């Protein structure tokens, strides 16, 4: 089922919960929607997405005709639209994925990232609060802890974001947490590590490296490449979000990750080995190109 910018009529009788998933045509959220639609046929899953450059409804073709799925095109940054959506759709639960997430772009488009990730979250949060939803899940990132997995961290670790994207997500977390602290509004925050899998846009490191190698181009590695990352498969992280929906407690923060971390250099080597079918260290090194690391520079103007 699909709808335009204006919210459509309610779902058929017998459907008990109504879950709004923002950014549902994006990579991770689309996997979560497919799992929700298939595992909870008595829930209405409403996909809200403005269809930005990295979104695609083809990610959802397996559920697009399901009775308990609906698509609504719209922007979380539009207060009147969001107010009308909550009034019309009678939302019970919100899963907020919608965000600008490309770290490299965030250095050049700081205002846009703050507008979508911070202001957009505030508009959505306010609308959800006024609609008295029973749970609001804000999808953050483990990048709020800093740029590498070299140091162990847990949910109580201090936030030390090192790029504009991570800073915008950390700022939005503050808005979300304030609604719990001030109003006891049932919010839950998740911080997941890097996710990979089908439908991922090629700006992210794994599909980017694969694409470069398939074009006979070198893997571009920032800095030393020794910085470590955790990686989760898309279907695994979808299961984690379903667990948070079911068992997540109001006011809590949940890390979603794995204890296994790999350096960017080692990741590149593994992909080169698989795609170029070589175990030669010299040949593997040939397919890696080290460039200057990103620097976070605040604009003075």
Image (cartoon, rainbow, N blue to C red):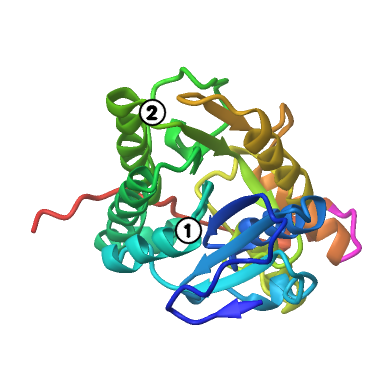
Query: Is residue 54 visible to us here?
Result: no
Q: Residue furthest bottom?
A: 4
The span shown in magenta is 276-280
Does the rendering let one see residue 34?
yes
User: What is the spatial separation of the Cα atoms under label 2 and label 1, in whole angstroms?
Assistant: 21 Å
Residue drawn at x 28%, y 67% as measured from the top left:
80
Q: Please name the residue that numbered disc 1 is placed on.
A: 98
Quarter of the image with the C terminus in it: bottom left
Residue 278 counted in the magenta span: yes
Q: Residue at x 74, y 31 (%)?
A: 260
Could you say which is closer to the camera, residue 72 or residue 142?
72
The correct choice, above or below, for 9 with respect to 85 in the image is below
Q: Which residue is mark 2?
A: 159
Label 2 Cα crowd, 10 Å radius (few <14 / some 14-19 / many 20+):
some
- Residue 99 versus residue 220: which sits nearer the camera? 99
Residue 152: percent from left, percent from top: 57, 20
Left or right for 238, reference 22 = right
Percent x, y of residue 107: 33, 58
Looking at the image, residue 191 sits to the left or right of residue 145; the answer is: right
Q: Is most of the magenta stretch helix, strand or loop?
A: loop
Assign a secondary structure to mark 1. loop
Considering every residue shown, the one lying at the far left of the view is: 301
């Amino acid at each position: 089922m699909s709808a335009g910018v204006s919210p459509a009529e309610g779902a058929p009788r017998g459907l008990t919960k109504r879950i709004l998933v923002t950014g549902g045509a994006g990579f991770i959220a689309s996997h979560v929607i497919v799992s929700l639609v298939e595992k909870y046929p008595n829930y209405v899953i409403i996909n809200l997405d403005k269809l930005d450059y990295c979104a695609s409804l083809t990610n959802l073709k397996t559920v697009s005709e399901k009775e308990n799925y609906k698509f609504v095109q719209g922007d979380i940054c539009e207060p009147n639209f969001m107010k009308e959506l909550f009034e019309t759709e009678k939302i019970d639960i919100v899963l907020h994925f919608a965000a600008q997430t490309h770290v490299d772009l965030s250095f050049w488009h700081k205002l846009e990232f703050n507008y979508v990730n911070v202001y957009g979250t505030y508009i959505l949060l306010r609308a959800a609060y006024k609609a008295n939803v029973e749970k609001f899940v804000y999808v953050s990132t483990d990048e709020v802890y800093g740029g590498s997995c070299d140091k162990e961290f847990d949910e109580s670790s201090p936030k030390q974001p090192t790029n504009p994207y991570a800073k915008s997500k950390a700022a939005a977390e503050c808005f979300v947490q304030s609604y719990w602290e001030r109003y006891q509004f049932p919010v839950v925050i998740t911080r997941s590590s890097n996710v990979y899998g089908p439908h991922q846009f090629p700006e992210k490191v794994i599909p980017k490296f694969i694409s470069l190698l398939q074009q006979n181009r070198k893997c571009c590695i920032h800095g030393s490449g020794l910085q470590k990352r955790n990686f989760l498969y898309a279907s695994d992280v979808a299961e984690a979000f379903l667990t948070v929906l079911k068992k997540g407690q109001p006011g809590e923060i949940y890390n979603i990750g794995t204890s296994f971390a790999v350096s960017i250099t080692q990741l590149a080597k593994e992909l080169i080995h698989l795609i170029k079918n070589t175990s030669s260290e010299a040949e593997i090194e040939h397919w890696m190109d080290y460039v200057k690391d990103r620097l976070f520079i605040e604009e003075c103007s």
